[in-house]
Image (cartoon, rainbow, N blue to C red):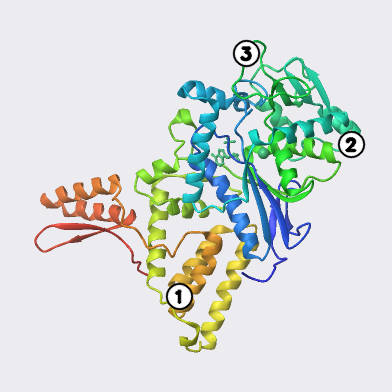
Amino acid sequence: MIALSSDMKLYNSLSKNIEEFVPLNAPHVGMYTCGPTVYSYATIGNFRTYLTSDLVVRALKFSGYNVEFIMNLTDVGHLTGDNEGDADTGEDRLEKSAKKEGKTAWDIADFYTKAFIKDFDELNLTKPQSFMKATEHIPEQIELIQRLQKNGFVYQISDGLYFDTVSYEKITGRKYGELSSLDKILEGARVEPNLEKKNPRDFALWKFSPENQKRQMEWDSPWGIGFPGWHIECSAMSMEKLGETFDIHTGGEDLRATHHPNEIAQSEGATGKLFVKYWMHSAFLKVDGKRMGKSLGNAYTLTEVKEKGYDAMALRYFYMTGHYRSPLNFTWEALSAAQNALNKLRATFASTEKLDEEMRTELSEEKLQKITDFRQKFTQSLNDDLNTSEMLSVLWEVAKSNIPSPDKRDLLLLFDEVLGLQLDVKPEEGPVPSDVLDLFEKRKIARENKAFFESDTLRDQISAKGYTVKDSPDGTSKLSKSFTFKD
Ligand code: AMP
Ligand code: ZN
C-alpha cells in the first residue's frame, strides 16, 4: 500500500468534469455499484462495467483508502419495457424468464445469482462487503416511499404509485435529471405512454399486482399488494449501508439516462441532502463493431469465452486495453492478442527470483532510480482517471527492464494489486482452443503438400494466438503454448 494519495483525479458524470477525488470522510470511502438483473447469464458486456467498478475499488485501496463497497442484485421488478425506453411497463424480467424456463421466479433468481457470482470470482473482481438482494430489503423500500409521500412527491394511479418529478422540482428547487439530457429519455421511448402519469418522466415507486392475478413475487404494502419499482431498491439499499450521502456510485453508461437520475430524485427527495458526490459510468462493450444483443447472437458469456480456450484473465487484460469511458470493441482476435500478452507476462513473472531481504545486494543508483520512476509512472496513470492502457504499458516496461529479478518480481506484484491479472498464477496449459487446432491441422496438410509459404503463414497465425509450433527432423510437429517474448 502507498501513502494516502490526494492526487487521484476521476471523471464525475455529475459535473461532467475531471475532478480531484476528495472523499467525504477520508480515509473512508463509500461506494455503490448497480448490479445485474438476475434473470439470465451476465454477458461480457455487463462484466466490462463490473471490471470498471473493481478497478475503482482496487485503485482506491492502492492509494490508501478504506473502501466500503456495496452492490445490489435486482431479483424483482425490473420490467421488460425498459428496453423500449419505459422501465414501468411490460413484464417482470424474472417472471418472464421463469415462465420460459418452467421454473419459479425465485429459482431463476437463485440460479442466475450463483452463476453471476461464479463468473465474478473467476474474473478476480473484488467482492463487495455485501451483494444486497432487492427481495431481502422490501421494508426499507416501502419506508423510503413513505418518506417521499410525506414530502409530497408521490401520487397514485390505477397501476401503482409514481414519483412526481414536477413537484420534486417545485418543492426542492432541484433539477430532475441532471445526470442525463431529458430529451434522451423521451427519444428512447417507443412504447405507448401511460396516459395516467402526470408527466412522461414520472416513474413507478410501487406497482400493484394485476387484479385477479397472483404474481410469484409480491408483497403487502400500505397501498396494496404489489412489488417495488426498479429504481427504488438502489436508493433504499445504498443509503441503508452507506448513509444518506456517500462518495461514489458506478454503473454502465445506459443507467445515466433514467435509472441514476431517478435514484438521485428519490434519495434527495427523501433526505434533502446530496445523495452521491462522484458518479462514474462505464462505456459499453461492442462486438465486431456492433451493439451486443441476445438476438444478434453476440452476447457472449464468460463460459463461452472459456470454452474457446481463453483464460478469464485474458478477458480482464483485454478490458484494460481501453479506457473505461471509451467504447471498447470485442473481437476474438483482440482476445487472442490479450491472451498472448498475458501468457508472456506470466512467463516473465515465473522466471523472476524470490529473495529474502537480507540476501539482496545493494542496487546501483541507476537501478534505484528506474524503480522509483516505474512506481511514479504507474501511480500517475492510475491517478489520471484510471488510465489502464498506460498502467499496462508501465507493467510491460517493468517486465522488459533490466532491474534485478527480485525487484522486478516485487514491482509486478505491486502493480498487479490494481490490475488483478493474477500474474503469480502458474500458466496453465489447458485445452488447446479449437481454432488453433484447426490451423495446426491445416499447416500439417500444407507441409505434406510442400506448400511452404502457406505453412509459414499458418505458423504466424498460430503464433498470434499464443501458440508455438516446433518441427522435428522426422517431419512431425509439436504444438505448445508460447511463454517467451522477443524484444
Ligand atoms: P442489467 O443486468 O441489464 O441491469 O445490466 C447490468 C450492468 O451492465 C448495468 O450497469 C449496465 O449498464 C451494464 N451493461 C449492459 N450492457 C453492457 C455492455 N454492452 N457494455 C458494458 N456494460 C453493459
Ligand atoms: Zn441502481
Q: Earlier in the sequence, mark 2 or mark 1?
A: 2
Q: What residue is pinned by disc 3?
A: 213
Write the residue at 75% across / 27% down.
201
Q: What residue is pinned by disc 1?
A: 401
Q: Describe the element under mark 1 as helix, strand or loop.
A: loop
The C terminus: image quadrant: bottom left
- Would residue 433 appear left or right of 216 to someone viewing this image? left
Label 1 CA crowd tier, 10 Å (few <14, some 14–19, many 20+): some
- Would residue 379 appear left or right of 483 to someone viewing this image? right
Q: Is residue 220 above or below residue 32?
A: above
Q: Amino acid at mark 2?
A: Thr
The quarter of the displayed image where residue 399 is located: bottom left
Write the residue at 60% across / 41% down.
35
- Would residue 48 appear left or right of 152 to someone viewing this image? left
| Farthest residue, direction left | 474
**Closer mark to the observer between disc 3 and disc 2:** 3
Return the mark for residue 430.
none
Depth order, front residue of 78/447:
78
Q: Is mark 2 within 8 Å of ligand 2?
A: no
Q: Is residue 105 above or below residue 273?
A: above
Per the model, the C-alpha gap separating discs 3 and 2 is 38 Å
State the image coordinates of residue 34 (x, y, percent, origin top left). 64, 41
Any part of residue 160 in sight: yes
Q: Are marks 3 and 2 in contact (CB under 8 Å)?
A: no
Return the mark for residue 172.
2
Write the residue at 19% across / 50% down.
443
Q: Describe the element under mark 2 as helix, strand or loop.
A: helix
Q: Is residue 323 above or below residue 366?
A: above
